[in-house]
Image (cartoon, rainbow, N blue to C red):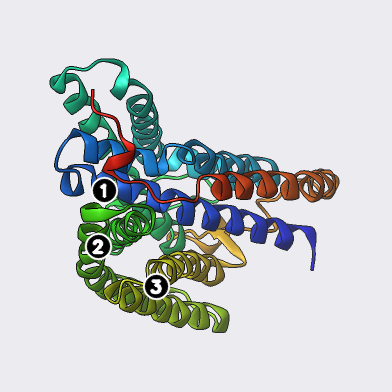
Amino acid sequence: MDLTTIWFLLVAVLFTGYFILEGFDFGVGMLLPVLGRDDRERRVLINTIGPVWDGNEVWLITAGGAMFAAFPEWYATLFSGFYLPLLLILLALIARGVAFEYRHKRPEASWKRRWDAAIVVGSLLPAILWGVAFANILRGVPLDADHEYVGGLLNLLNPYALLGGATTLALFLTHGAVFLALKTTGDIRERAGALAVRLGVGAAVLAVGFLTWTLSIRSSAAAVVLAVGAALALLGGVAAAKVRREGWAFTGTAVAIGLAVATLFAALFPNVLPSTLDAAGTLTTTNAASTPYTLKIMTWVAVIFTPIVLAYQGWTYWVFRKRIGVANIPQH
């Protein structure tokens, strides 16, 4: 296996990890006004992700850095062609992060409502736009012979991409509800578990439709196997949520999201950004890659530091593994 393939796989793993971990963050943020009936309950919801949300975003930063260093042509074309949706994602993530930090700074209800709205919108926009972006990456976009994007915003808002956005939205909502059922106690746990089942049914319908459409556009034997695995994992997760086995339910939704993202990358390979105009404009792992020397140095850096980062993040989740409830939140 050559280094370009290894780094394509590493970028895929980083984005997969990001969507699994940040997926439940987004779900919790979007469900804040749905499952949080008063301020204390909303504080419970926020505290379930408080210790980990910023660490989860490191996966995105690392994925973007890996893409920039290993496949600079892919990075340049993608971030110029998808400038507006990626900018909206960035602004949403900034507003969401600020809201987590500022919400508790003042006691007024109006102050908290404004930051709660920022958390909801800051979670909703990325949940939709990441699905739109990755659907367009797989479907292909208009690129000229110089690998420059020559389309407009409407090219990105095609039916397949919008279905991709609806699918990631539904999956993240389900994943977030399952996570809350896993991490909370009392009434919040019961409401989250019941909501996860209802959301999961809708997510399963959308996911099956999106993955079927995906395989009709681009496919491989590996992509088919991964897509079937994603559907089965999601159904298993919903079934586990129905019988209140939250640990297995969370495992199911996490595996489903991971396999769904892996399906997209498996169907895409060896391309990284297909052109809908001319095959000569298609970016592949070969023509978009950095020099072999750059890839070799990056590989050694990844080998040394990746286990350290994984160990630290795993330790963080272990430390904050216990459930919390309204009883853990003081009144003030």
- Residue 214's label in the rendered image is 3
Q: Badge 3 local density, few (<14 within 10 Å), some, or many (20+)?
A: many
Residue at (40, 53) in percent of width and height: 23
Q: Earlier in the sequence, mark 3 or mark 2?
A: 2
In the picture, residue 316 is in which quadrant?
A: top right
Does 211 sit above or below residue 29? Answer: below
- In whole angstroms, how far apart are the C-alphas of marks 3 and 1? 20 Å
Mark 2 residue element: helix
Q: Is residue 291 visible?
A: yes
Q: Which residue is mark 1?
A: 154
Q: Earlier in the sequence, mark 2 or mark 1?
A: 1
Q: Which residue is mark 2?
A: 159
Looking at the rendered image, the disc whose residue lies closer to the viewer, 2 or 1, is 2
Q: Which amino acid type is marked by label 1? A: Leu
Mark 3 residue element: helix
Does 322 sit above or below residue 119? Answer: below
Looking at the rendered image, the disc whose residue lies closer to the viewer, 3 or 1, is 3
